[in-house]
Amino acid sequence: MQITPLCPRAASEALEKLRQLRPLVHCLTNDVVQEITANVLLAAGASPAMVVAEEEAPYFAGIAGALLVNVGTPVPERLRSMQLSAQAAREHHVPWVLDPVAAGVIPWRDSEIRKLIALYPTVIRGNASEILALQGAGKGGKGVDSTDSSASAVNAAVELSRSTGSVVCVTGETDYATDGERILSVSGGNVMTTLVVGTGCSLSALTAAFCAAEKDPVTAAISACALAKRAAFIAGKHAKGPGSFHDEYLDALYAIEPQDFLGESL
Ligand SMILES: Nc1ncnc2c1ncn2[C@@H]1O[C@H](COP(=O)(O)OP(=O)(O)OP(=O)(O)O)[C@@H](O)[C@H]1O
Ligand SMILES: Cc1ncsc1CCO
Ligand SMILES: [Mg+2]
């Protein structure tokens, strides 16, 4: 299947919509990345809220602009809240994004991820090893880190999208998003992104934010990737190492304007 670089105008328009809407993004995420997730959403122009108890999370999922479910540090109680929230999101036509952290590494986690996939996420966003594992290929990653290239997982992403009905976004040196019919891509960024914890997890939250603002989930997912790649590229020009990269990345997410995408190849 042909891979098409994201059109700059589409990225620009998606960011414009995000900035106008400033969507409320309900995040059920892991214990490691709560703060970077909230900060990435705020810097990019969305409103994060981490509402976790099963007594209130499903209600909140129904009134949010989008929901993020990330299984990085799963415990039974939180997984129940995630399932109920995903169901509520679906019933209220709220888009939701699944981040299948470390899929392919631990059988129990894999079975929990399968239960969530059965609730029809709008987008599944993972690294290459996670997407390969969900499609029954590859050997799994090194814990939460990928040991595969994103290019090697494109076909698995297409197949996974066709079998689940979800848009699948696989990230790495190049990022791809597919609905099983189209594949859109963005390249660039900076490899130092992989040395700051939660850049992938917070990208999944950003994908949820774009899904709230942009109707087409393939365009939404790849536009989130385009914003993250551009911010990483700018951060890489100023950073001395992962510590300053983290700060520069947030600053760049805040500073990038929709028109900055125009005239650039993505
Ligand atoms: N080799 C690379 N070169 C440039 N950018 C990269 C590279 N690998 C990953 N990235 C970028 O890093 C970000 C996170 O993607 P990655 O695939 O590492 O997710 P992840 O493994 O789920 O991250 P995490 O679990 O640490 O949150 C994305 O913006 C992606 O484009
Ligand atoms: C390091 C780590 N461990 C569980 S989740 C997480 C964040 C990156 O996915
Ligand atoms: Mg991840």
Image (cartoon, rainbow, N blue to C red):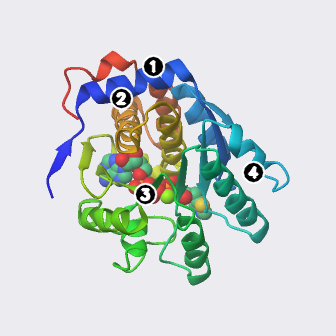
Mark number displayed over residue 234: 2
C-alpha span from label 2 to label 3: 31 Å
Which amino acid does the dot numbered 2 rest on? Answer: Ile
Of the residues under marks 2 and 3, which one precedes in the sequence?
3
C-alpha span from label 1 to label 3: 31 Å
C-alpha span from label 4 to label 2: 38 Å
Q: Looking at the image, which residue sits at the far front?
A: 91
| Left or right, residue 262 beside residue 125 | left
Residue 252 against residue 96 in the figure, above or below: above
Decide: marks 4, 1 in contact (CB < 8 A)? no
Which amino acid does the dot numbered 3 rest on? Answer: Ser
Of the residues under marks 3 and 4, which one precedes in the sequence?
4
Q: Residue at x 42, y 20 (%)?
A: 16
C-alpha span from label 4 to label 1: 34 Å
Residue 147 % position (x, y) = 36, 69
Residue 220 against residue 130 in the figure, above or below: above
Closest to the camera, between mark 1 and mark 3, is 3
Q: Which residue is mark 4?
A: 58
Q: Which residue is mark 3?
A: 166
Closest to the camera, between mark 2 and mark 3, is 3
Q: Residue at x 58, y 44 (%)?
A: 93
Q: Which residue is mark 1?
A: 255
Q: Residue at x 40, y 38 (%)?
A: 220
C-alpha span from label 2 to label 1: 10 Å
Of the residues under marks 2 and 1, which one precedes in the sequence?
2
- Neighbour tally class for label 4: few under 14, some 14-19, many 20 plus, Cα within 10 Å: many
Decide: marks 2, 1 in contact (CB < 8 A)? yes
Closest to the camera, between mark 4 and mark 2, is 4
Which secondary structure, mark 2?
Answer: helix
Which secondary structure, mark 1?
Answer: helix
Q: Quadrant of the N terminus?
A: bottom left
Which amino acid does the dot numbered 1 rest on? Answer: Ala
